[in-house]
Image (tube, grey):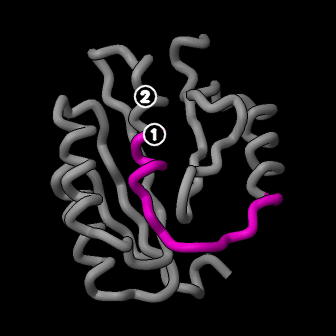
Amino acid sequence: SAENEQEFHVILFASGRPMQKIPSRLTLATEENRNATGAFLDTVVPFGQTDPIPALEAAFDALRPVPDTEKGLIQLLTDGSFPDNAATLARIEQLNKNDVAFINTFLYGFRPPEAEAVLRQIAKENGGKFKYVSPDEFE
C-alpha cells in the first residue's frame, strides 16, 4: 500500500543555492520516480565548493510533512571538507533540535582528517552512521 512506500528527495550542493530534483519535495520511491532521478543525476556536473548548509535547510524543509511519529533520514554525501565546519555543525543542531531526522554521512575519495572528523560527529550527534567510500568502491 502507499502508506508503506518509501519516499525520497535528492538535493545536490556545491556553493550557493542547492540543485534539487523537481518536484522539490519527498516523492514516492516508485520505479518511475527512481528512473527520473537517475536521469536527473546523469545531467549533473560537479563543481564549486562544498557548502552543505543550504542543502541541509532544503532537506529539513522536505521532511516537514513527515508525521511527528516518524523520523526522517538524511544521507549527507561529500567528497571534501566543508568551508566552515563550526557553522555546519551549529546549523544542523538548530535544524534537528526536535530530533526529526537521523543523519548518515558518507565521505568519498580523498580522506581529509578534518572532513572525516566532522562527518563522524554529525552522524554520531544525529543517530546516524559514518562511512568512508574509497575510490575503488565507486569507480
Residue at 48% x, 69% y is 50
Residue 59 - label: 1
Residue 76 drawn above or below residue 34: below
- Residue 137, image x and y in percent? 57, 79
Report x, y in % for residue 83. Answer: 37, 73
Is the residue marked by circle 1 packed among few (<14), some (14-19), or many (20+) residues within 10 Å? many
Relative vertical location of residue 109 with respect to residue 99 in this rendering, above or below: below
Identity of the amino acid at label 2? Leu
Q: Which residues are magenta?
A: 42-58
Q: Nearer the viewer, residue 115 or 130?
A: 115
Secondary structure of the residue carrying numbered label 2: helix
Q: Secondary structure at mark 1?
A: helix
Residue drawn at the location 46% of the way across and 88% of the way down: 110
Residue 127 visible in image = no
Image: 28 above or below 81: above
Question: Which of the 4 image quadrants contains residue 121?
Answer: bottom left
Name the residue rendered at 57%, 22% in the picture.
Answer: 5
- Is-magenta flag for residue 67? no
Left or right: 14 in relation to 89: right
Mark 2, other Cα within 10 Å: few <14 / some 14–19 / many ≥20: many
Quadrant of residue 31 within the rendered picture: top right
Q: Which residue is mark 2?
A: 63
Q: CA distance from mark 2 to mark 1?
A: 6 Å
Q: Can you tell which mark lies on residue 3?
A: none
Residue 1 picture location, percent across and down:
60, 11
Residue 88 in sight in this render: yes
Dot 2 and dot 1 residues touching (CB under 8 Å): yes
Quarter location, residue 68: top left
Of all residues, the one furthest to the front in this rendering is 16
Residue 109 on image: x %, y %: 51, 84
